[in-house]
Amino acid sequence: MAAQDRPRSGWIGVGRMGFQLAARLLNAGYDVAVRNRTRAKAEPPAERGATIAERPVDLADRDVVFTMVAASAALEAVTTGPDGVLTSPDATPGILIHSSAVSRRVSALIRNKAAGHGNDFLAATVSGNLRRCSPPRSR
């Protein structure tokens, strides 16, 4: 697939896991814009070619936007809060994929808000912090 045929991607939350996933898109030649609450964490993807967005709403014109934030309140803030990615009157991402571990209530709230804008919404929760995982039980 030619670079111009690839969806323009946005990534909100480029901490330890978000950075690794956004980096894979960058390595594959995708146009990626990133937003992180702490700007310093957005610098490493920028060094690989990502554009830094100042606000989540700056990603509203992207074909697909991923979120990987720490909690329900953070997901609400970056999607429907002031300057959230779903608040632009002029643009809306085609697909919103949230990979944040959040409550079902907040996931449903964001899904409904996205649907009201004509967005496709996918809940694709990711977990992987080995320090928080319990060892497997023996059977």
Image (cartoon, rainbow, N blue to C red):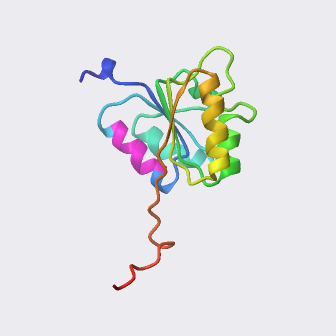
Q: Residue at x 31, y 39 (%)?
A: 27
Report if residue 104 lies within the magenta region. Answer: no
Report if residue 25 lies within the magenta region. Answer: yes
The C terminus: image quadrant: bottom left
Q: Residue at x 60, y 17 (%)?
A: 91
Q: How many badges with numbers are in the image?
A: 0
Give 50 or 133, whichever is nearer the viewer: 133
Q: Residue at x 51, y 72 (%)?
A: 132
The N terminus: image quadrant: top left
Q: Position of residue 53 (x, y in %)?
A: 58, 32
Q: Position of residue 45 (x, y in %)?
A: 45, 42
Q: Residue furthest front?
A: 139
Whether residue 54 is visible: no
Judge left or right: residue 137 versus residue 114.
left
Vertical comparison of 128 with 58: above or below: below
Q: Which residues are magenta?
A: 18-26
- Give the quadrant of residue 86: top right
Q: Position of residue 59 (x, y in %)?
A: 57, 28
